[in-house]
Image (tube, rainbow, N blue to C red):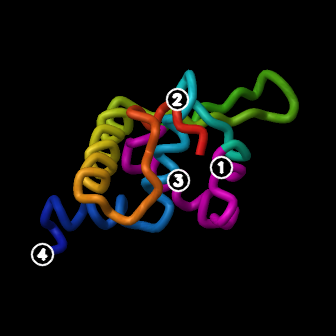
Amino acid sequence: MDENCTVYKTLDYISKKWTLLILLEIYKGKNCKKRYYEIKNKIPEITPKVLSIRLKELEIEGLITKNIDATSFPVKSEYALTKIGLDFIGIIKDIKNWALRWKIENKICKQLDCKNCDL
């Protein structure tokens, strides 16, 4: 496959380990914003270094933004999905629906919308 192919380029960053789970964790909840430690606590297997790298990559690709609030100490950073990131959540939901439809060996999901998942 040619490195300039759209599919190749896209898969290059979304297929990296933890990327989809990070996007999903930012999406979950009421406001689609998460601080670093919130994401880290929900994905305990990820190392701090890898999480930082993936967040920077997702920011560069335009799927998330990093908002820094320097009005207080310590400085607070929040990660939020961009319009592109929110659109990509639909693809993650399609993957979930495909897995449930074809009975991939996994726990049956009780939530129709991943946004309300507490797992």
According to the picture, the residue beneath numbered tag 3 turns out to be: 56
Q: Quadrant of residue 77?
A: top right
Mark 2 / mark 4, whichever is N-terminal: 4
Which residue lies at the image location 71% right of the left edge and 27% below the top edge? 69
Mark 3 / mark 4, whichever is N-terminal: 4
| Labels 2 & 1 near each other (Cβ < 8 A) | no
Image: 24 above or below 17: above
Point out the tag, 1 or 3, that comes first from the N-terminus. Answer: 1
Mark 1 to mark 3: distance in Å? Answer: 18 Å
Q: Amino acid at mark 2?
A: Cys
What residue is disc 2 on? Answer: 32
Q: Secondary structure at mark 1?
A: helix
Mark linked to residue 2: 4
Q: What's the amino acid at mark 1?
A: Lys
Drawn side of residue 8 relative to residue 68, left or right = left
Q: Is residue 66 magenta?
A: no
